[in-house]
Image (cartoon, rainbow, N blue to C red):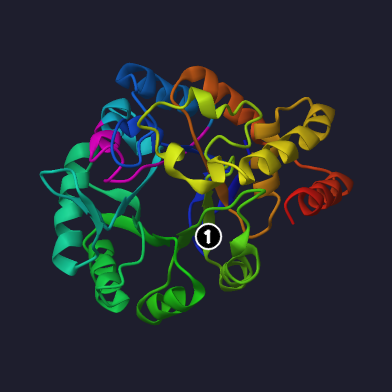
Amino acid sequence: MKKRNLGKGGPELTVVGFGAWAIGGPWLYGWGAVNDEESAGAIRKALDLGINWIDTAAVYGLGHSEEVVGKALAGVRGGVFLATKCGMVWDSRRNVKIHLGPESIRKEIESSLRRLKTDYIDLYQFHWPDPETPVEESWQVMTELKKEGKVRYIGVCNFDVPLLKRCSVIAPVQSLQPPYNLVTREVESEILPYCYQEGIGVVAYSPMMSGLLTGKFDANRLAEDDWRRREKKFHEPLLSKELSLVDKLRPIAAKYGKSVGNLAIAWVNMNPAITSSIVGARNDRQVEENVRSDFNIDESDMRMIEQLYKETLG
């Protein structure tokens, strides 16, 4: 699998990374019930097939995703680039809030290190901006954690350009993790060009739009507690348009002997600002499908995809 550097002086990551959001199990933004043995097996299968990095977060399953990842990496931790996130905390009643206070960040990293069964994290990221805490105070703590050797690289998720600039005054931002796919394209106008210009690595999440662009999406099959049941983009009137785009993409995907999901991931990775796409999986079969996404799309087909997007959703 191809690899790209994560920003200036950063490590080489495979262009598909293993996303561990769904394997966290039930919580406010869960995807329904999971089988931990299948989840751990999926992680090991991903590594066997060449994926060299995993992205998780403390809040996924309220700590459970990190625990599963930690167990799955027993004995192989040194060969895996491990990314996790802080800034979404929960209380005893499972209520979640965004908080990037300095003391909270330090408390969170110790908990993550314990759950992940490691003494360092390769990439530590802010999960979401915290409007209640000056980002300079939060970012200063991240630089301290790096100096202490608890993290190797520091990055952010869901930040805009002004926030990236404020962080960069204190210390370089190694990477940004934004949502990016064929439908969710807000980052194209300003954020991706800025990251490309400044040498900030970009790892895109939801490249298949949380399953909608797989070519297999069926809203009726979602678990009762699946977070997607509450999201507008998974309901009418948008849903029909989005699924219409999926159908129009099938002939292009077939040309490469790929699924629409493979095409969607490859499309994201065609953007020169993108380092890698984070793709979730809950079992071996899904992993085997995801790794088929490492291919280039012809320029003529990229133009056709753009035309279909504009006709359907533009």
**Residue 230 picture location, percent across and down:** 43, 42
Q: In this view, does 132 lie to the left or right of 296?
A: left
Instruction: Tell me the residue at 50%/23% (across/down).
Output: 221
Which element type, helix, strand or loop, lies under badge 1? strand
Q: Does the magenta stretch include residue 53?
A: yes
Residue 41: tell me if it is visible: yes
Quarter of the figure with residue 290:
top right
**Residue 14 picture location, percent across and down:** 55, 41
Residue holding disc 1:
201
Up the image or down, 206 lies above or below 45; here it is below
Outermost residue on the left side: it is: 92
**Total label count?**
1
Give the quarter of the figure containing the N terminus.
Answer: top right
Q: Does the magenta stretch include residue 136?
A: no
Give the quarter of the figure containing the C terminus.
Answer: bottom right
Instruction: Tell me the residue at 19%/53% (across/down).
Output: 108
**Residue 55 picture location, percent across and down:** 41, 43
Q: Which amino acid does the dot numbered 1 rest on?
A: Gly
Q: Which of 104 and 273 is in front in this view?
A: 104
Up the image or down, 108 lies above or below 279; here it is below
Q: In this view, does 22 lie to the left or right of 118?
A: right
**Residue 40 picture location, percent across and down:** 35, 23
Q: Is residue 4 left or right of residue 308?
A: left
Outermost residue on the right side: it is: 300
Residue 7: tell me if it is visible: no
Outermost residue on the front side: it is: 237
Instruction: Tell me the residue at 35%/36% (across/down).
Output: 30
Q: Nearer the viewer, residue 152 or 127?
A: 127
Up the image or down, 171 lies above or below 212; here it is below
The magenta span reads 51-67
Instruction: Tell me the residue at 24%/76% (across/down).
Output: 137
Q: Nearer the viewer, residue 259 or 247?
A: 247
